[in-house]
Amino acid sequence: MADFRDHRVLCYGYGSLWAFGCGTQPARPLAHDRQWLVDQGVFSGVVITQDYLDTLGLNGPSKKNLLSIIKAICDVGCFCGVLVAFAIGERLGRKKPVTIGTTAMAIGCVLQTSAFSPMQTIVARIVSGIGHGINTATTPVWQSKTSPSISRFKLVVMKIFGFVVVDWINHGLSYVEDPSLGVCH
């Protein structure tokens, strides 16, 4: 049995994969995979709730363009984040950009959660998108360099499976009219 207090155990083989998984899981679920799932799956269900529309003053057909900008502006931030990762990625390695990206995404999540106007939400989604772009450009490269080829497919399947689960949960909750769940259509 390996003694995990010895740091050398974590530098080779499955110990390395285990250490990488534990070390990047705070980044991957929050930053890379989960943010993608939240942006693509959950947020599309949030922007149509009456509470969200009332809070941000986005009711009515005249506000549909602004609502579309709020939904899509995260992709602009992602593009900027990819450019940042391109500029700093090789100099800083892989860990520091993932940390920077995760921090930016956490700040963006806090700003999105606390937003009470469309402009606050737009700024928050750009900040979150920059972090997501940094992580999207950095994490797969880091993962491909550190994980065995047999596990790479499993990691991609987990991401797709997570997206499917989020979409079905979002679809199922769209029929619930219970304000305590935060979902009212």
Image: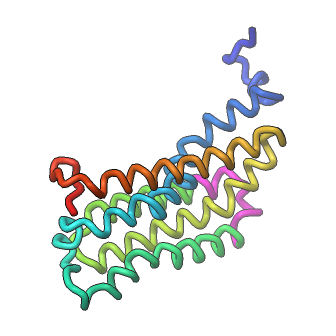
Give the magenta part as a residue range: 87-99
Of residues 72 and 50, the one drawn nearer to the viewer in this rendering: 50
Q: How many marks?
A: 0
Q: Position of residue 76 (x, y in %)?
A: 53, 79
Left or right: 108 in relation to 62: right
Tell whether position 90 is magenta: yes
Query: Residue 133: horizontal and vertical position, in percent?
Result: 59, 67
Residue 29 drawn at (x, y percent): 53, 47
- Please give the name of the residue rendered at 66% of the width and 67% of the height, measured from the top-left corner: 85
Which residue is farthest bottom? 62
Main secondary structure of the magenta stretch: helix
Relative vertical location of residue 169 with respect to residue 88 in this rendering, above or below:
above
Quadrant assignment, res 17: top right
Residue 171: percent from left, percent from top: 38, 56
Residue at 57% across / 55% down in the picture?
A: 32
Quadrant, the N terminus: top right
Q: Residue at x 68, y 59 (%)?
A: 138
In what quadrant of the picture does the C terminus appear?
bottom left
Left of 142 or right of it: where is 67? left
Q: Taking 146 as reference, is 110 left or right?
A: left
Q: Is residue 176 above or below residue 72?
A: above
